[in-house]
Image (cartoon, grey):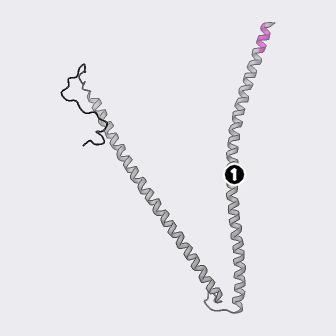
Amino acid sequence: MATKSDAGLKPKKENIQRKNIAPKVVKGVSVRYNQADLKEQNQHLTAFNEELQKDLAETQQRVRDLELRFSDLEKENAEVKKNLTDCHVLLVSAKIDPVLGEKVGEAAQENEDQRKKVMSVSTDLLNELIAFSNTASQQRVRLEEIQAAMTDLTHTRELMMQERESFSLEAAELEKDLREAEALLL
């Protein structure tokens, strides 16, 4: 049965006389030490690579665990918010003061009106905050685009300045050559 490493090897031909084969030269001690050093370095690198692979696998597993935990916490947070809202609705509908736990009459109505105003203002502020966040995101994208364009323009300007300087030098050289040619003609 041939192994994977044997697949690329040719079968050995036994009892066949080889012609014109130079005898093997035994290499010096330094080559053996060098090979031993290389083998040791290779082993160290292999061990280091395996350790890095292990660390990578552990880190990837940790990321997956943290993502799962984050997802669970988000679900739990949504449930708590829903329960809080439901409890608040129940308290308000029963005209029970959430702090004192007692029913209140006119004060409860005033509190309810204030609560509605606060909820309305909170909703408005939340909507404005969302709009601001969206605008800020769009502005950030535009700023990044502008910064990229500015970088390109700066680079182009530098190239133009170099070309202009080169052109000026060439023009000065041509002018000098022209004067020399006129001087030779005269």
Magenta range is: 178-184
Describe the element under mark 1 as helix, strand or loop. helix
To which residue does mark 1 refer? Answer: 143
- Can you say which quadrant of the picture contains the N terminus? top left
Residue in the picture at 69% in, 81% down = 115
In magenta stretch: residue 11: no
Placement of 75 over or under 106, stated as above or below? above
Task: Identify the residue shown where x is 52% and y is 73%.
Answer: 76
Disc 1 packing (10 Å; few <14; some 14–19; many ≥20): few
From the viewer's perspective, tell me whether residue 13 is left or right of residue 67: left
Quadrant location of the C terminus?
top right
**Can you see residue 98?**
no
| Residue at the limit of the structure toward the left, as seen here | 15
Q: Is residue 180 left or right of residue 104?
A: right
> Which residue sits at x=72%, y=75%?
121
Instruction: Pinpoint residue 159: horizontal percent, then vertical percent.
Output: 69, 33
- Relative to 106, residue 153 above or below: above
Q: Position of residue 10 (x, y in %)?
A: 28, 33
- Provide residue 154's location: percent of width, then percent of height: 70, 40
